[in-house]
Amino acid sequence: MARETAEYLVVAPHPDDAELGMGGTIVKLLRAGKRVAVVDLTSGEPTPFGTPAKRRRETRAASAVLGLTTRVNLGLANRTLEATLAARIRVAEAYRTLRPRVLFLPYWRDAHPDHLAASLVATQARFHAKLTKTRMKGRPHYAERVLYYYCTHLRTHADVALVVDVSEEWAAKVKAVECYRSQFFEGRGKRAGAVLEYVGNANRYWGQMINRQYGEPFTVQETLGIATPECIV
C-alpha cells in the first residue's frame, strides 16, 4: 500500500493484531480525517490454516474495511521475533519515514513471545529513531506520545489508563476481524469465531466502564495530559 507520513502509527506483531486490539479506534481516527498507518512486523505465518498469500489477501481486505491506505509489513521473523538491534533499526526507520506524532504499541505483558518482543523493540525504536550521525534511512524523528493497546494472550487488563468509545465503529471492527478467515474461522469447528466473541465481550465490558456500548482500552508508561476536560466522556 502507498506510504505517506502519518499522525498516528500502529505497530502490530502480526497482521490482525491491530484490528483485534484497536480496530475501532483506527476507524474513529480515520473518520475524523486523521492520517493513520499500520506497521505489521511479521507475516504472521505459518499458522495451522493460513498461508502467506492468504494472509496478505486477508490483510488487504481488512485494511480496506478499516479505511487504511498506508500499511507496511517489515517481514521480520514470525514465531522467532526478537528485540535485536537489527530489528530495532528496521522499526526505527519506519518511524523516521512515517514520522508519527503518536505511536500505538502492543502492551508489554503477554503470553505470546512475539508480542513481548514486538512491544520491546517498538518501544526501543522510538528512542533509536531520533539518533543522528547514523546510517539509518530517513531524518531523525521522536514520536511525542506512546499509547499501548491490548492484543494480549493473557486474560488481564490491569493497567488500563483510558478507554476509547468505539460504539459507532464496532460494526466496522467486526467486519475487519472477520476478514481473517484463516485465523478465526476456518478449521475451528465449534470454536469458529470464539476469538471475536471474546473481543466483543471485552469491548462491551470496557464500554460499560465508560457508560458506552463498546470501548477499547489503552494504557501508558508516561504521564498523559489532556488539553481540556471537555474531551472526557
Image (spheres, rainbow, N blue to C red):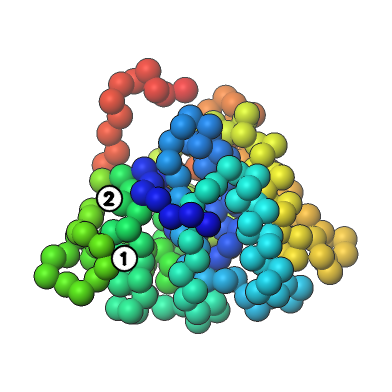
Q: Could you tell me residue 207's position as x and y percent?
A: 59, 33
Q: Could you tell me residue 233's position as x and y percent?
A: 47, 22
Q: Could you tell me residue 139's position as x and y percent?
A: 21, 59
Whole-Å distance between the Cαs marked 2 and 1? 13 Å
Give above or below for 18 relative to 138: above
Q: What residue type is labelled 2?
A: Ala
Q: Mark 2 points at which residue?
A: 143
Q: How crowded is mark 2: few (under 14 residues within 10 Å), some or many (20 or more)?
A: some
Question: Residue 172 is drawn in which quadrant?
Answer: top right
Mark closer to the chain start, 2 or 1: 1
What residue appears at the point 30 percent right and 72 percent down from the top-left corner? 89
Q: What residue type is labelled 1?
A: Glu
Front residue of 117/99: it is: 99
Q: Residues within 10 Å of mark 1 (few under 14, many from 20)?
A: many
Most extreme residue toward the bottom, as rendered? 80
Most extreme residue toward the right, as rendered? 189
Q: Could you tell me residue 162's position as x and y percent?
A: 43, 37
What residue appears at the point 48 percent right and 30 percent down from the top-left corner? 32
Q: Are marks 2 and 1 in contact (CB under 8 Å)?
A: no
Q: Mark 1 points at which residue?
A: 93
Give above or below for 7 relative to 193: above
Give above or below for 225 relative to 153: above
What residue appears at the point 43 percent right and 67 percent down from the top-left corner? 118
